[in-house]
Image (tube, rainbow, N blue to C red):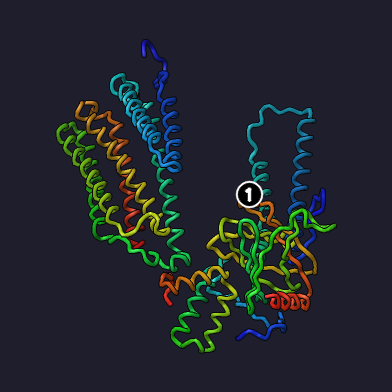
Amino acid sequence: MSDPEPGTYKVAEVKTAPFDARFPNTNQARYCWQGYIDFHRCTNIRGEDYEPCQYFKHVYRAMCPKSWSDMWDEQRESGTFAGRV
Amino acid sequence: MTGYQPHPWHLVEPSPWPLVGGSAAFTLTVGLVMWFHYNSISLMILGLVMIVATMIQWWRDVIREATFQGCHTSYVLSGLRRGMVLFIVSEVFFFLAFFWAFFHSSLAPTVELGVTWPPVGVHPLNAFAVPLLNTAVLLSSGVTVTWAHHALMEGKRTEAIQSLAITVMLGLYFTGLQAWEYYEAPFTIADSVYGSTFFVATGFHGLHVIIGSTFLMVCLGRQVFYHYTSSHHFGFEAAAWYWHFVDVVWLFLYVCIYWWGS
Amino acid sequence: MATPAQLGLMDAASPVMEEMIYFHDHVMLVLILITCLIFYSMLVLISSKYIYRFLTDGHVIETVWTVIPAIILVVVALPSLKLLYLTDELDNPQLTIKSVGHQWYWSYEYTDYYDIEFDSYMLPLGDLSKGDARLLEVDNRVVLPVDTSVRVLVTAADVIHSWTVPSLGLKMDAVPGRLNQLALQCSRVGTFYGQCSEICGANHSFMPIVIEAVPVEVFEGWCDMMLDEE
């Protein structure tokens, strides 16, 4: 699930984060959060290069506003992140 | 109150207290704004003094009308009873709003809290330490206030004074314990929605305990000064209702916020 | 986009808006029938010469005018609920975009694979070209492919805003800390305008929303262009 080459953007090939039955509400904040948590847990356990982890990254990139994931990145670095990763 | 009155109702005399009380409330409101915005408390103190002065004098007048002029007929009493019941019902809904805020925040905690309750980093108070003692204290005070009521109805003057005094002391003990608990608490009102809902809900309950204790203290004084008869003592009954209401609110606070919420 | 002195709804540009217009017409029909009946009854009552002094109750007519309105309410409520849940339906989205309300502009993110991010400010009067809509044009439009199921995630960075596009039948509050999901599908090519719909401060009226629905290939070209710019 790596990014395709620039200049070849094809909507038909884009697969955004699918509907997830765990998050049926209008408020999708938990979907974004869970994707972020899952990605970092996954890479912490299996290492950065483990390909299946990329799925969670894809989910949280699609679902989280940039400002949220950037803020959480900062919080993880300073050790103040609220989630367990 | 001279001469013949062809009905059982109490038509109140012209009184300065509604106007004075309104001015006091306005002064207090502006005083609070002055405190919040300019950190100056003088107008707020003035407003508080005016409010307290109005309350003392207004209720003094009510006692004069009730106890000394005999204006509170059975019809008037029925109105007072309904009024007190409606007032307590309105207070119930007041607290319902805080419980709503609490459950809204705790049943589906947001991502900022770490999707857990209590939120990540908040260490709640131990429900089985001082809060459990507080529960025992308030429940006991509910017993003693009922004891006082029965003593009053059976004309046992000394017993009524003693049991009412115990109730007041238990109320003050509760307030003291709660103050100590606030002082010791490892979180503040600014620590996430946990701190906000906790201190707003228990704080307003504490305020109601203080109001109820004051009400009971006034009743104790009136009992000492022979204001009550074994059949006519609505002031005391209203205080007892209010005290039971405060007691029940505490039970919900204890079970939901202190126990389940920790 | 709305025209001066327009009375009806805007032309639908999405299946949901199409349904909303049908529902509006349905309710309007019921309303007009009721209004006519009531006006007719009032006219008959005030113009009638007959008077009956001893009328105190009439159980039959009271039952009738309780049961019939109840049935009418059900007839209105059922399609309304159906439409309400249809609006919530997000079927297999192809694309996710994020719309963040700020005081006082919207910013957008297309981050399914690349990071396309831009702010969308209203064009001031001096920057308008001939034929532009005053207070509605923006510097960067939201470009979207037609006939594609799009998930819009709406949130805010400061105060509550509301992201609205009437001709697509969309309106969603943008609340800080929440990530509200909308299902968007443009059924035809065009530009669709909307305005912030939650009072959010001094320039609340000056943070419009413009969607430019284009064919898929054009959208892909636009994405490549946006990526090249970075």
Chain containing mark 1: C
Q: Residue furthest right?
A: C130
Left or right side of C61 for A23:
left
In the image, is residue C54 above or below residue B241?
above
B25 and C226: which is toward the camera? C226
Can you see residue B89?
A: no
Q: Quadrant of residue C46?
A: top right
**Residue at the far left in the pictured view:** B158
User: Which residue matches tag 1?
Assistant: C202
Amino acid type at circle 1 is Ala
Q: Residue at x 78, y 43 (%)?
A: C36
User: Which of A54 and C39 lies nearest the eye of the viewer?
Assistant: A54
Rendering coords of residue B88 (x, y %): 38, 41
Q: Secondary structure at mark 1?
A: loop
- Residue B103's x, y, as percent? 43, 58
- Asked if residue B128 lies left or right of residue C133, the reply is left
The spot of residue B31 in percent (x, y) is: 42, 36
Q: Residues within 10 Å of mark 1 (few under 14, many from 20)?
A: few
Q: Is residue B95 above or below residue A33?
A: above
- Asked which quadrant contains residue B38, the reply is top left
The answer to which quarter of the image holds residue B6 is top left
**Residue B200, image x, y percentages:** 39, 50
The answer, for residue B122, to whether it is visible in the render is yes
- Residue found 41% across the figure and 26% down from its top: B20
Location of the C terminus of chain C by quadrant is bottom right
In-front residue for pair C137/A22: C137
Direction from residue B118 to residue A52 in the image, left or right: right
Quarter of the image for the N terminus of chain C: give it.
bottom right
